[in-house]
Image (cartoon, rainbow, N blue to C red):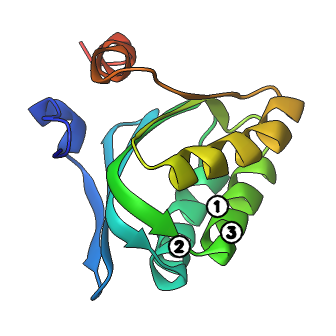
Amino acid sequence: MTSIPLPAWSTTGVLVDQANSRGRLELFQPAPLVLMARCNGHFSEDLADEWVRVLGPVLARTRGITMFNEWREMNGYDSASRRKLTTLASARRGVFTAVYFIARSRIVTMGVNVASVPMAMIGVEFATCGSDQDFLNKLERVRPR
């Protein structure tokens, strides 16, 4: 299985392209209220630190973001990574309207489900998409015109 072929517009505005021996993180901001993350391999704590370092300032100045996480090729993560991202997102009430994921790893999907609880408590739609097409349809709805 490979990553979803994402529409070209959704991978513009590169914020991060970082890799280590175990995984890779790409972050994009293709529109003012749209963020895209693509992770492959193992999402280690150093990749999470880079995510927080780069997106922290973006999230501090923006509200109403829809975020997409194309994590089909992520095969695992450090527990500290999940905690850091959940803390970053849940500490910023009103920043996200929705956060969508596509993942195939059961451990990654379980982590998303665990993180969905605090996000739901602050009113954020936080969901794993059931199919590539569902993910792409949600992405198309926020495409800049």
Specify the farthest residue to the bottom. Answer: 21
Neighbour tally class for label 1: few under 14, some 14-19, many 20 plus, Cα within 10 Å: some
- Residue 104 position in % (x across, y down): 39, 42
Q: Secondary structure at mark 1?
A: helix
In the displayed structure image, the side of residue 85 where residue 32 appears, left or right: left
Neighbour tally class for label 3: few under 14, some 14-19, many 20 plus, Cα within 10 Å: some
- Residue 2 position in % (x across, y down): 16, 46
Neighbour tally class for label 2: few under 14, some 14-19, many 20 plus, Cα within 10 Å: many
Label annotation for residue 127: none
Label 1, on which residue?
85
Q: Are marks 1 and 2 in contact (CB under 8 Å)?
A: yes
Residue at 17% x, 34% y is: 6
| Residue nearest the viewer, comparing 29 with 98 | 98
Q: Are marks 2 and 3 in contact (CB under 8 Å)?
A: yes
| Residue nearest the viewer, comparing 127 with 7 | 127
Label 3, on which residue?
84
On the image, which quarter does residue 78 sit in? bottom right
Mark yes or no: residue 64 visible: no
Residue at 56% x, 55% y is: 107
Vertical side of 55 occupied by 143: above or below: above
| Residue nearest the viewer, comparing 12 with 75 | 75
Task: Say whether disc 1 or disc 2 marks the residue closer to the N-terminus.
Answer: 2
Residue at 52% x, 47% y is: 106
| Amino acid type at mark 1 | Leu
In the displayed structure image, the side of residue 28 where residue 89 appears, left or right: right
Looking at the rendered image, the quarter that the C terminus falls into is: top left
| Amino acid type at mark 2 | Ala
CA distance separating discs 1 and 3: 4 Å
